[in-house]
Image (cartoon, rainbow, N blue to C red):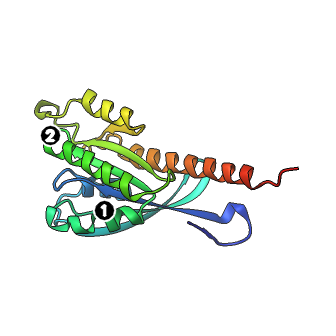
Amino acid sequence: MSNINNDSPENEITTIKIVVLGKCLVGKSALTYRFISDKFPTEHDTTVEDTYRITMTINEKNCELEILDTAGQDDYQTMLDTWIESGNCYLLVYSIDDLGTFNAIKERYERICQIKNNDNYSVIIVGNKCDLESERKVQKEEAENFAKSNGLEFLEASALNKINVKEAFTIVAHDYLLKISESNQNKSIFSCPCF
């Protein structure tokens, strides 16, 4: 979970594994590339599995975000469980102009809940391509209600127009850090000897 370079807390780096999931063509790779490079990809080959790393400070902690950009094609769904098992955080991405992609993230969320047997993970629902407002098929309220009913974070984003891209990744990482901090505090309380 954490790699410690020295005994000094300032040098401790917390690794957070973020898995980007969603159907094909929702913009998972565009969001990831925009976040990592601050550029919008002009060309794109279909992703099978790409890993990126970026170091940043979140919650006053030095963090290395290891981002796994996954395939959305049905051919690769046998790998879904492996991707889920490897992650701490999940961006569930749909496209606001495609209702089928929104329904697919509901299924992926259910699968995460089945595989992860603890509460030490974080999920954010991301409605990508919010620049396509005139072609909207998924109402914002519907996505907000799904997120709220499951205790998840939600936002709409546009990789093209650089809207809420950084926020999507940092919010999910922030939420995860809070959960593991609370979990560690609870472990400390329960491990104290009783007098």
Secondary structure of residue under mark 2: helix
Q: Give the quadrant of residue 76.
A: bottom left
- Name which residue lies at 38% across and 32% down: 148
For badge 1, the amino acid type reads Asp
In terms of depth relative to the viewer, which is nearer, 117 or 25? 117
Q: Is residue 1 visible?
A: yes
In terms of depth relative to the viewer, which is nearer, 159 or 136? 136
Q: Name the residue under label 1.
A: 69
Would you say 189 lies left or right of 176 here?
right
Secondary structure of residue under mark 1: strand
The Cα atoms of the two marked residues, 1 and 2, are separated by: 21 Å
Q: Which residue lies furthest to the left in this view?
A: 135
For badge 2, the amino acid type reads Leu
- Name which residue lies at 36% across and 61% down: 84
129 up-or-down from 141: above or below = below
Q: Name the residue under label 2.
A: 99
- Name which residue lies at 14% across and 33% down: 136
Q: Which of marks 1 and 2 is nearer the N terminus?
A: 1
